[in-house]
Amino acid sequence: MDVTLLGTGAPAGLPRPLCPCAACATALGADARAATSLLVDGALL
């Protein structure tokens, strides 16, 4: 079984659009994380 994590952020991704919190403020640019998702044997879950 081949498992690949595609995103490890919050369900909406990180930073969240228009969110003023400290976590979102520091997660800009290279630190941005996609919403949680993964591939299992090539199938997107």
Image (cartoon, rainbow, N blue to C red):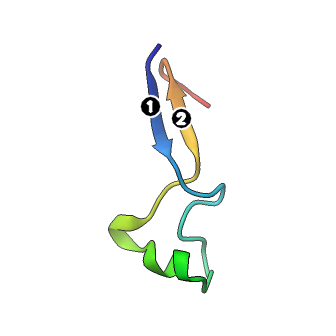
Looking at this view, name the residue that lies furthest to the left: 30
Residue 27 screen position, x and y as percent: 45, 72
Asked if marks 2 and 1 touch (Cβ < 8 Å), the reply is yes
Label 1, on which residue? 4
The span from disc 2 to disc 1 (Cα, nearest Å) is 6 Å
Q: How many marks?
A: 2
Looking at this view, name the residue that lies furthest to the right: 11
Residue in the image at 57% along x and 60% along y: 13
Above or below residue 25? Residue 27 is above
Residue 23 screen position, x and y as percent: 53, 75
Label 2, on which residue? 38
Q: Is residue 45 left or right of residue 24?
A: right
Looking at this view, name the residue that lies furthest to the top: 1
Q: Is residue 2 left or right of residue 19?
A: left
Above or below residue 17? Residue 13 is above
Residue in the image at 58% along x and 47% along y: 36
Residue 40 screen position, x and y as percent: 52, 22
Q: Amino acid at mark 2?
A: Leu
Q: Amino acid at mark 1?
A: Thr
